[in-house]
Image (spheres, helix red, strand yellow):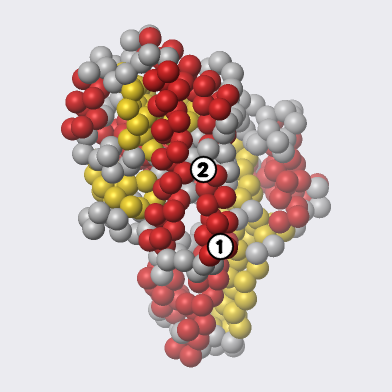
């Protein structure tokens, strides 16, 4: 019997009425003859509530204890949803991450899945039991609860689909698919019927909030077909898969990310290996680097600027300041009033002049570009954070309002 993994985000189970609606979706799919594993996030903004409670007690709580606290949100969701399905007369069991066999590393608050022991789930599915699994969490080798970080429930769902060889993984959310831009920013975005893993991976990593990049990476690695669709209304969504029929579309989307910061190192020695010394220190702190800009050396020194996530900016500054004498730089600064705006599409590598159109759109809107990064399927620019939404609109108009 075919299996479908369905994931429901926090807005989809935000209150009793929505929990009941999700129960209808799950049981409706079950009635069509499918086995179902549903992965559920914490209700609404409940995770934020828990973070607030932690801050009241200890603003510097350990990551281990934060995981213990945050995992409670999903436990509430899965139990309530199971109760709603149970009330309808269907066989159902809720499971926490460790009960569903999720084994992770010990990197608390941002753990990586090592393996999923599927024996218990397979036994239950063999009895035609609907399984409701807590997303976002697992357990490490010390039997401590861990959480998977931002987008963890998406990652849990795709990982389960891969481990259980599901027909597909459906990601139910508050939008009805993937659009060429955020409908809250752009007036007439185009809904995509399909998008490739690579394109979606770029959009996810560049600020599109529908899917998290780790879940898309996993989908690509294990060839899990992912469908993003609405939990609010019944209509076709967007399929994420390996190959997509070419449409008359140069780019697939425009995204912005305001959760970035620029670290600038001024007048560092212009000697071989200096960039390695800087970025190896950052790497040891497990901080990811994005765009890097290095000036032409002059007077025996050079400047280096790079982009990190805003949440890692303070730690990155601390690491570099701790090695100021060793590195020999004169100035170090952090700018959080920036945003990254990106265009993504496989068409970028086969169509000339795309970058020029992007820059033209920004110039017409009098938006200054501070940094630029390009690849085969993306162009990213750093702009002032106050200009980010205007930048998205300007670029989208340039490509889609013709």
| Label 1 neighbour load within 10 Å: few <14, some 14-19, many 20+ | few
Direction from residue 8 to residue 369 in the image, left or right: right
Quarter-wise, where is residue 268 in the image? Answer: bottom right
Q: Residue at x 56, y 27 (%)?
A: 16
Residues at marks 2 and 1 touching, judged by CB atoms closer than 8 Å: no
Say which of 252 and 47 sits in front: 47
| Label 2 neighbour load within 10 Å: few <14, some 14-19, many 20+ | many
Quarter-wise, where is residue 81 in the image? Answer: top left
Secondary structure under tag 2 reads helix
Q: Which mark is residue 204?
A: 2
Secondary structure under tag 1 reads helix
Outermost residue, top direction?
Answer: 32
Residue 276 lies, in percent from the top left, at 41, 74
Q: Which mark is residue 292?
A: none
Q: Earlier in the sequence, mark 2 or mark 1?
A: 1
Q: Which mark is residue 55?
A: 1
Q: Which of label 2 and label 1 is nearer to you? A: 1
How far is the residue under mark 2 from the one under mark 1? 29 Å
Can see residue 107?
Answer: yes
- Give the quadrant of the N terminus: top left
Say which of 311 and 101 sits in front: 101
Residue 285 lies, in percent from the top left, at 41, 70
Q: Residue at x 44, y 58 (%)?
A: 66
Q: Residue at x 25, y 22 (%)?
A: 125
Residue 258 lies, in percent from the top left, at 64, 53
Say which of 158 and 99 sits in front: 99
Direction from residue 343 to residue 138 in the image, left or right: left
Q: Residue at x 57, y 63 (%)?
A: 56
Residue 217 lies, in percent from the top left, at 39, 42
């Amino acid at each position: 019997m075919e299996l479908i993994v369905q994931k429901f985000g926090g807005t989809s189970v935000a209150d009793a009425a929505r929990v009941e609606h999700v129960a209808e979706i799950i049981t409706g799919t079950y009635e069509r003859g499918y086995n179902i594993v549903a992965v559920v996030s914490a209700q609404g903004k409940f995770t934020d509530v828990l973070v607030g409670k932690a801050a009241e007690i200890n603003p510097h709580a350990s990551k281990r204890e934060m995981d213990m606290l945050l995992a409670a949100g999903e436990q509430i969701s899965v139990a309530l949803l199971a109760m709603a399905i149970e009330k309808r007369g269907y066989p159902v069991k809720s499971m926490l991450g460790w009960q569903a066999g999720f084994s992770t590393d010990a990197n608390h608050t941002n753990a990586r899945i090592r393996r999923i022991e599927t024996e218990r789930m397979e036994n239950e599915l063999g009895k035609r039991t609907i399984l409701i699994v807590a997303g976002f969490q697992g357990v490490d080798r010390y039997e401590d609860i861990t959480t998977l970080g931002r987008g963890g429930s998406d990652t849990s769902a795709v990982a389960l689909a891969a481990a259980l060889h599901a027909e597909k993984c459906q990601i139910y959310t508050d939008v009805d698919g993937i659009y060429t831009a955020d409908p809250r920013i752009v007036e007439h975005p185009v809904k995509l019927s399909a998008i490739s893993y690579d394109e979606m991976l770029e959009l996810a990593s560049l600020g599109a909030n529908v899917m998290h990049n780790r879940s898309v990476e996993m989908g690509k690695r294990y060839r899990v077909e992912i469908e993003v669709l609405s939990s609010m209304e019944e209509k076709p969504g967007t399929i994420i898969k390996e190959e997509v029929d070419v449409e008359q579309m140069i780019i697939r989307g425009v995204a912005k990310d305001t959760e970035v910061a620029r670290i600038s190192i001024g007048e560092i020695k212009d000697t071989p290996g200096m960039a390695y010394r800087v970025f190896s220190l950052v790497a040891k702190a497990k901080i990811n680097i994005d765009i890097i800009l290095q000036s032409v050396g002059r007077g025996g020194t050079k400047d280096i600027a790079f982009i990190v996530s805003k949440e890692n900016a303070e730690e990155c500054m601390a690491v570099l300041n701790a090695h100021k004498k060793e590195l020999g730089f004169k100035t170090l600064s952090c700018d959080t009033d920036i945003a990254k705006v990106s265009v993504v599409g496989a068409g970028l590598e086969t169509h000339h002049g795309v970058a020029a159109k992007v820059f033209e759109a920004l110039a017409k809107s009098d938006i200054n570009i501070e940094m630029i990064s390009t690849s085969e399927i993306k162009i990213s620019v750093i702009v002032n954070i106050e200009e980010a939404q205007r930048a998205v609109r300007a670029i989208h108009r340039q490509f889609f309002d013709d």
